[in-house]
Amino acid sequence: MGRSEGVRCGRRKEEGMKKEKKGAAAVRKPLSKKTGITIFTLIMLIMGVIIVCYHNPLADPADELLKKIIACVLIVAAIVVFARFYDKITQLPQELYANRRLIWRLAKNDFKRRYAGSYMGAVWAMVQPVVTVAMYFVVFQVIMDQRIQLAGKGVEVPYLVFLTAGLVPWFYFSEALTSGMMALLEYEYLVKKVVFKISILPIIKIIAATFIHLFFVLVLLIISACYGFYPNLYTLQVFYYSFCTFALVLAISYTTCSVVVYFRDLQQIVNIGLQIGMWATPVLWNIGQMSENVQMVLKINPLVYIVEGYRSAIYGEQWFWEDFYSTMYFWIITVVLFVIGTLVYKRLKVHFADIM
């Protein structure tokens, strides 16, 4: 009796283990290639229909038609590229999702390690941006008493509020981009480990930069409230535009972190590009002072969407979907950049350990 009961118990355990394995396999089983391509194509087609059907009565018909044509061409190109390189494009997002808990732990450790041994710790990460904002405040508002006029609304915005709403996303973008680019070189010892998923390294650095960014968002809200721009429903869009910045930096970082392993001078080129980009993006100046044609050219830069979005969230009282074409354009460009970054990363990663 005892022996037969033991055999039955053993069989039950084996059956239970088999069921658990089957359940785990069912959970981990990814979408088939055909299903993935179909879902992506449907999403893109829905986006295309929305773009084609959307009509802005205040816009110039010729400009609106041009925007629709460009958007549709980009959507078709995205579908073709996604179908052609499906396996390479989807492998990276799957790795990031599968290692999400590890990414969160390493991001927190990276943030703590960055300021380990420093007496003031993470405070130093906040000192330089705060000093920069204070310097611009003294020059432009105390000395020059400059204010920004909101186009068509007759509302004057103190320059400090205008400036801070532009600098907060810019500091986040520049810090995250620089950190993400250097992720593989900084964690060189992990790149040489065969079993470690090095694809998670750039996002770890970007998340670590996000911790500091959240502090500056709080500073922005406090400064705005001091000048009478109190938080409301529109203010919640700050988190949407923060996510936009996160997605854009992540998309770019997989290209830069891969190329910099082979071409170390890219770090200096990016730093110079950030200096130029700060003036090419309406961080310190008002894009509303430009003509409509110039604004259209400037809005090719996806950072314009983010910077102006922060300002709309703080004092502009405009929802992000009201700027329909800019929103569609931003996400199409971000997806395209992520696809390019994924392909570049997959192409170059095989020789990372040999070069380092």
Image (cartoon, rainbow, N blue to C red):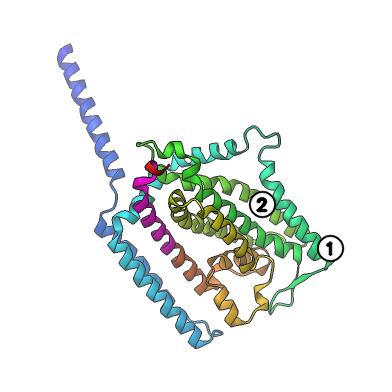
Answer above or below: position of 204 versus 73: above
- The residue range painted magenta reads 335-353
Answer above or below: position of 300 versus 165: below
In the picture, which quadrant includes the C terminus? Answer: top left
Residue 90 is drawn in which quadrant?
A: bottom left
In the rendered structure, the answer to whether residue 346 lies left or right of residue 156 reads left
Q: As rendered, which of 127 and 29 lies closer to the eye?
A: 127
Q: Are marks 2 and 1 in contact (CB under 8 Å)?
A: no
Could you tell me the amino acid type at mark 1? Val
Q: Pointer 2: what residue?
A: 216
Name which residue lies at 42% across and 75% down. 71
Q: Pointer 1: what residue?
A: 142
The answer to whether residue 323 is visible is yes
In the rendered structure, the answer to whether residue 107 lies left or right of residue 190 reads right
Q: Residue furthest top?
A: 2
The answer to whether residue 49 is visible is no
Could you tell me the amino acid type at mark 2? Phe
Tell me which secondary structure the magenta stretch mostly adopts.
helix
